[in-house]
Structure formats: structure tokens, C-alpha cells
Amino acid sequence: MSVRRNYTLLPSSPPSGPSSASLIPHPPSIPPHSLHAWPSHSRNTEFDIEEMPDDTAAPATLQRHSTDLEGVGYAIDDLKGKTAIEAKTALINRALEQTGMGRYQWCIFFLCGFGYALDLMWAQAFSLVTPRIQQELDVTDEQYGDIFSGKSLHPFSAGLTVGAFTWGILVDIIGRRWAFNLTVGIIAVFGMILGALDSWRSICAIIFFVGFGHGGNVPIDATIVLEFLPNDRRYLLAALSVFQPIGVITTSLISWSLVPTFACSTALPACSALSPATPVSAGTCCTRSLNAGWRYALYTLGALSVAAFFARFFLFTFYESPMFLVGKGRYAEACEVVRCIARVNGRGGARCY
């Protein structure tokens, strides 16, 4: 049988005044659902974020808990006129502030940065490998999509559009945790399939699904970084864009080393373009074995995508966003997540899930 715990924001030094704080668990004997604060004087009081009504916070209710609001960094006037859920969100946000910019936030930043890099890695790859695909599969110029300057980007752009719309809705239904992992998982699975295909139609279809994963990954990663970073470090959200040119450079180096090295002579036609009487051989047409460079490049990008998924799902424990949990009315879970993040950052004591 699990025991529900409460959490108190306690200063790291004796309570002589406001100071930095850490989260510690309360004994099970204290009633559940409460987020406590140690005020600037010696009396410890309770602010119950779960029992507040979900309408406009009544002045009497706020006045009764004014000491607690001040203890976690909010004056009573700051929350007057706000709804209860807004007040709860403010308290959770302040608790996250007190966990600081620690190991958990840096892991989030670099994992999401990896996701940003994957976005332009794949977009760059399609423009670099399609000339070799065209030669091997005898794809005519009319069959290429031409939304952007690069060929074959039409299905990718369509996937980005549908993915951004779909995941923008799903992320507020299934939560950040699932979206954080599933979007990169989709990219990894369909990215690995691309290199094995021999049909232009099937390649375009799979490119759509790679774009579908990317369409959700980038905006979701930005949301996650914004919700977990302290206010004084939110400039790092813009710094995520640094990972995108890194992705472009990475793909360019991979393609430069593999695609021309394992490619047919440009003078060779596609094997499907030969007359039935002409024997298919390495000297008469561009065979799959002679033109494997573009496949090797896509396999390499697929392996990097699998590595990103592995790091997110297996190596890192991603806790659901407290902001999402508060929005769903799951206040006790939001407090639990804050406690777990504090522990990862070296500011808590109890073991987390």
C-alpha cells in the first residue's frame, strides 16, 4: 500500500528570513495534498493547493494563507483576482524555481537540443541523397515535390504540417512525457526503414512519417524546456537553435563521406530503364550494390535517431511536467514531480519513482 506524502519548502539555513529552499517529504501523519511553506518567522503554516475551489480565489481564502504565499516568494497582492488554478500554478512554478538550474534541467536542455539537431539533419539529408535516388530508381523530374528549393521535400513538409497540428493537440491530452518520447521514436523507426526501400512512392510515404515525427518534436521540445527552466535561465530556449546548424554540419559530413564514395557513375542509366534484352550488370546500369552510399547515409541518420530515443527513454527519467499536471487537477502528482526534480538536483532526500 502506497503512502501519500506532503512537501514542505524549507530554507537551507535556519528560518531567520527568506532564503533558498529544498523539498523534503513530510511524515505520513500530516494530512495529504498540501504544499507547505516556511515563512520568514518561526511559525510553520499550511497552504493547501488541492482543496482550494477552482474558481476565482476568494480574498478571505488568500488572506488566511497570506503568510504561506509570502514564504514561497509571492505576496498576497500578487495572487488577488487570480483563479485558484492560477494560484496553484504560481506556487508550483516558484517551487521549481527553488530547485535551481541543476542536473535535471541540463539533461532536458541537451536532450531537446539533440531533437532540434535531428530536425535539420533529416531535412538536409533529403536534399543531398535524392540525386542518387533519382539515378538508381529512374525517377523523373516531374515526380519530385518542389515546395522548397530541395527536391523530395514535399512529403516531408506535409508531414511537418500534419505533425505540428496533431501533436499540438495530443501533447495537452496524453502529456509531455509520452510526446517527448514518441515523436523521436517515430523518427527513429521510419528513418531506419528509409534506407531499405526500392520504390520512389514508398520512399515518399515514409518521408511523410519522418516529417510527422519532426512536426511534433521541435515545438514539444521547446515547450518542455520552457516549463522546466528557471526564469533566469529561459534565455536558453533561444540557445536550442544552435543545435540546428550542428545537425546540418553533421549530415553534410556524413553525406560527403558516404554518398559519393559508394555511388554509380553518373553515365550509367537506371536498371529499370534498360530494354528487356539488355542484361543487368554492374557495367550496364546503376545497381543497388553500386549505389549504396545514400542508403548508408540514411542508415547512419536513423542510428543517430535511435540513439536519441534510447537516451530519452532508457537513460533519462523524464517526469511529467508539473504545469500539465496542475492543469489536469493532479496537484499531488505535481508536488511529487517537484520533489523528484529536487532530488535529481541534489536537493532532496527520498527516492523517487
Image (spheres, rainbow, N blue to C red):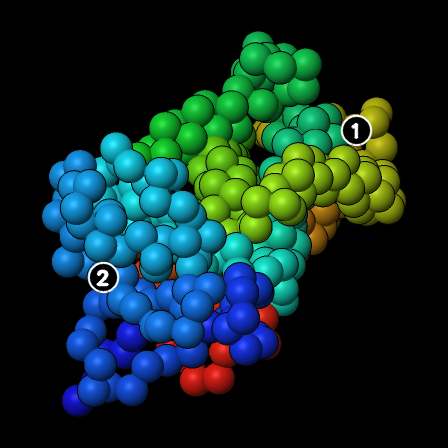
Rendered position, 156 above or below 1:
above
User: Could you tell me which residue is drawn at 40 percent across and 46 percent down?
Assistant: 75
- Specify the amino acid type for callout 1: Leu
Query: Could you tell me which residue is drawn at 62 percent across and 52 percent down?
Result: 109
Residue 48 disc label: 2
Residue 269 sits above or below residue 112 on the image: above
Q: In which quarter of the image is the C terminus?
A: bottom left
Tell me where residue 279 sits by quadrant: top right
Sequence-first tag of 2 and 1:
2
Nearer the observer, 322 or 313:
322
- Exactly how many numbered labels are in the figure? 2
- Whether residue 223 is visible, yes or no, is yes
Residue 77 badge = none
Q: Where is residue 108 in the image (x, y as percent from the top left)?
A: 57, 56
* Label 2, label 1: how far apart the Cα atoms are: 75 Å
The part of the image, by quadrant, that contains residue 103 is bottom right
Q: Position of residue 267 (x, y in %)?
A: 84, 25
Could you tell me if residue 307 is visible in this image?
no
Q: Would you call the spot at circle 2 few (<14 residues within 10 Å), some (14-19), or many (20 or more)?
A: some
Task: Check disc 2 and give the amino acid type.
Answer: Asp
x then y, percent, for residue 63: 24, 49
Front residue of 275 and 71: 71
The residue at 20%/41% (across/down) is 59
Compared across the picture, whether 351 is left or right of 28 comes to: right
Determine the secondary structure under disc 1: loop
Q: Is residue 3 left or right of residue 71?
A: left
Residue, x 27% and y 78% (percent of image)? 5
In the picture shown, does residue 27 fall above or below 122?
below
| Relative depth, front residue between 126 and 212 | 212
Q: Name the residue under label 1.
A: 268
Residue depth check, mark 2 versus mark 1: number of the one nearer the observer = 2
